[in-house]
Image (spheres, grey):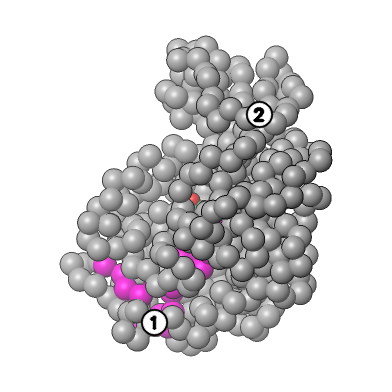
């Protein structure tokens, strides 16, 4: 493809986390047991049958990642193979066809490249969010899997998820509601997990928090995750821990941060059940992490009818999370050497 160079005239640094229509999106259809040839479209509307199982029974799943402009002007994706693998596992759990890896990667790369002018420039603090989705379409009424599917990828330039800029301290409120059961679909990126969380998020926001924090659905003791991010904790004994749970999404950002903590900062890392009430006094710093949240330090957590400060005054960024953020973002922006080979550069 011959690309027009040059950028849109956007206030890149002022972007929030909202949908902005870009020029192209990618669509491929699965029908009669196989994937058809996909391609770029300009129409952002999807026309589907009123009986589509994605509309009634939430037979759909999605992914989320960012394309970013490196210091040298190249554009990269962060570990997209892991998003493919996660979508593959989710599709299988929801009886949807696997999107072949070549199709997944090619659709993303073509969509990002075709929307070159919408990719935020280096240093703007913004990124191009990439949203692949797989939906069951076609005519259906009874509770059974669709016979036809659409795989679509669209992109939108975005700014920070929680605040105006940079490393923002957030607050979490423990929810009375459960996000996912241990043997349910919480560890898959199924849209069905998120509709039920809207009320929990709204309730948390009404309590003055940015997001809901979910505890395990069985005992309401152990930390699961936040509404759209996993949890990482630097302990006072110097270790770096994260919850083990069958009900949480396996975050690619978390996996990367745990690797950084272990091999770059030489911290003792552990993935284990974390009992919030019993262990909170041993917490040194806490953060939420994810593609959208990047790494957001948690200042205070609401539970048992009061706010509990985590680090100092509950408003400051601690040194461990600051370092973790700098190391991760440094790799993602191409400012530090990509020792782990996490970046995949796109041919523009
Ligand atoms: C529920 C939930 N947990 C965690 C994450 C973080 O996952 P990742 O780091 O792969 O973006 C997300 C998505 O961003 C999410 O929706």
Q: Is residue 154 above or below residue 138?
A: below
Determine if the magenta segment contains residue 160. Answer: no
Pointer 1 local density, CA inside 10 Å: few below 14, some 14–19, many at least 20: some
First reached walking from the N terminus: tag 1 or tag 2:
2
Circle 2 residue: 41
Disc 1 to disc 2, how far (Cα)?
A: 45 Å
The residue located at (34%, 61%) in the rendering is: 210
The residue located at (54%, 59%) in the rendering is: 12
The residue located at (76%, 67%) in the rendering is: 72
Specify the principal SS of the magenta part. Answer: strand
Where disc 1 sits, the SS reads loop
* Number of numbered discs visible in the structure rendering: 2
Q: Position of residue 334 (x, y in %)?
A: 72, 69
Does the residue tagged 1 have its C-beta within 8 Å of any atom of ligand 1?
no
Pointer 2 local density, CA inside 10 Å: few below 14, some 14–19, many at least 20: some
Q: Is residue 173 left or right of residue 331?
A: left
Q: Position of residue 271 (x, y in %)?
A: 54, 68
Q: Is residue 68 left or right of residue 199?
A: right
Q: Which mark is residue 163?
A: none
Q: Is residue 145 visible?
A: no
Q: Is residue 182 above or below residue 328?
A: above
The residue located at (68%, 17%) in the rendering is: 31
Q: Which mark is residue 316?
A: 1
What span is colored magenta in the figure? 280-302
Q: As rendered, which of 331 and 164 lies closer to the eye?
A: 164
Q: Position of residue 22 (x, y in %)?
A: 58, 40
């Amino acid at each position: 493809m011959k690309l027009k160079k040059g950028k849109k005239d956007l206030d890149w640094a002022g972007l929030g986390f909202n949908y902005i229509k870009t020029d192209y999106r990618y669509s491929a259809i699965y029908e009669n047991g196989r994937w058809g040839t996909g391609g770029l479209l300009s129409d952002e509307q999807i026309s589907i049958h009123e009986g589509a199982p994605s509309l009634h029974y939430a037979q759909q799943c999605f992914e989320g990642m960012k394309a970013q402009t490196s210091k040298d002007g190249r554009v990269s994706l962060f570990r997209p193979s892991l998003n493919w693998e996660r979508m593959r596992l989710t599709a299988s759990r929801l009886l949807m066809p696997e999107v072949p890896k070549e199709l997944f990667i090619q659709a993303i790369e073509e969509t990002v490249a075709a929307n070159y002018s919408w990719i935020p420039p280096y240093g703007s603090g913004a990124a191009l969010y990439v949203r692949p989705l797989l939906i069951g379409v076609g005519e259906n009424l009874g509770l059974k899997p669709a016979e036809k599917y659409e795989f679509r990828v669209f992109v939108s330039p975005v700014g920070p998820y929680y605040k105006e800029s940079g490393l923002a301290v957030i607050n979490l409120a423990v929810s009375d509601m459960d996000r996912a059961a241990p043997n349910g679909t919480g560890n898959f990126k199924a849209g069905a997990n998120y509709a039920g969380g809207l009320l929990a998020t709204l309730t948390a926001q009404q309590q003055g928090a940015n997001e809901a924090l979910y505890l395990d659905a069985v005992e309401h003791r152990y930390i699961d995750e936040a509404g759209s991010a996993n949890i990482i904790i630097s302990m006072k004994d110097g270790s770096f821990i994260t919850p083990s749970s069958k009900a949480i999404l396996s975050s690619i950002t978390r996996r990367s941060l745990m690797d950084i903590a272990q091999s770059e900062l030489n911290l003792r890392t552990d993935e284990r059940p974390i009992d919030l009430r019993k262990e909170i006094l041993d917490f040194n710093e806490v953060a939420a992490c994810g593609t959208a949240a990047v790494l957001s330090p948690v200042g205070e957590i609401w539970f048992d009818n009061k706010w509990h400060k985590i680090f100092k005054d509950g408003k400051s960024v601690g040194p461990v999370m600051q370092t973790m953020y700098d190391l991760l973002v440094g790799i993602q922006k191409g400012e530090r050497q990509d020792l782990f080979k996490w970046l995949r550069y796109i041919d523009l």
